[in-house]
């Protein structure tokens, strides 16, 4: 299966450049894979560049999970990360994703210095 880079994913979500959106849609219409890293980068771009809020970011990730042509790496971990992110948006989606991936891999507790992240089950504040 083909894979997409962050900028392709961002075009699909923001739809801000018609020519690039068309190229991105054409590329993914036969199926494409989205890695954890690309998804994390895309959520950062949405927040930092496009000034999207937590609710919009969570909705965008959920749309990707349900996209007919995209396969997201570890969709169950991504869904768990979205759930945590909706509950504690100040954490940032990437923090929630790191915890969800560690949990799925069976590598808990997740050591952290982050006070907010450390409030979630499965973490250990250092």
Image (spheres, rainbow, N blue to C red):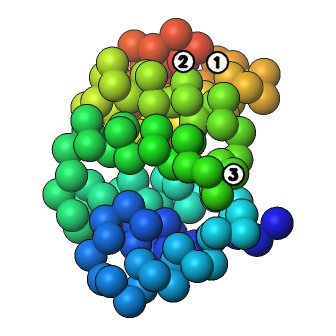
Q: Mark 3 points at which residue?
A: 71
Residue 111 in view (yes/no): no
> Which of the two labelled residues, at mark 1 and mark 2, occupies the earlier sequence position?
1
Q: Which label was assigned to residue 109?
A: 1
> Measuring 66% from the left and 29% from the top, which residue is drawn there?
76
The spot of residue 124 in percent (x, y) is: 54, 17
> Measuring 41% from the left and 78% from the top, which residue is drawn there?
21
Mark 1 nearby-residue class (10 Å; few <14, some 14–19, many ≥20)? some
Of badges 2 and 3, nearer the viewer stands 3
Q: How far apart are marks 3 and 1 (CA)?
A: 28 Å
Q: Is 43 rendered above or below residue 108?
A: below
Q: Name the residue under label 2.
A: 123
* Mark 1 touches mark 2? (CB < 8 Å): yes
* Mark 3 touches mark 1? (CB < 8 Å): no
Q: Is 62 rendered above or below residue 79?
A: below
Q: Nearer the viewer, residue 6 or 66?
A: 66
Q: Nearer the viewer, residue 47 or 22?
A: 22
The extreme right residue here reads 1
Q: Quadrant of residue 57?
A: top left
> Measuring 43% from the left and 60% from the top, which residue is drawn there?
42
Q: Which label was assigned to residue 93?
A: none
Q: How far apart are marks 1 and 2 (CA)?
A: 5 Å
In this rendering, position of residue 42 left or right of residue 26: left
Q: Quadrant of residue 110?
A: top right
Mark 3 nearby-residue class (10 Å; few <14, some 14–19, many ≥20)? many
> Measuring 52% from the left and 10% from the top, which residue is drawn there?
121
Q: Nearer the viewer, residue 38 or 126?
A: 38
> Which of the two labelled residues, at mark 3 and mark 1, occupies the earlier sequence position?
3
């Amino acid at each position: 299966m083909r894979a997409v880079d962050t900028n392709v994913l961002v075009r699909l979500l923001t739809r801000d450049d018609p020519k690039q959106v068309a190229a991105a849609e054409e590329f993914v219409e036969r199926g494409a894979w989205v890695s954890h890293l690309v998804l994390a980068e895309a959520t950062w771009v949405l927040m930092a560049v496009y000034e999207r809020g937590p609710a919009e970011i969570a909705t965008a990730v959920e749309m990707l999970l349900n996209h007919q042509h995209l396969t997201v790496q570890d969709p169950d971990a991504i869904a768990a990360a979205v759930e945590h992110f909706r509950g504690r948006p100040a954490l940032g989606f990437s923090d929630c994703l790191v915890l969800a991936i560690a949990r799925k891999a069976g590598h808990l507790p997740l050591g952290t210095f982050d006070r907010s992240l450390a409030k979630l089950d499965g973490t250990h504040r250092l």
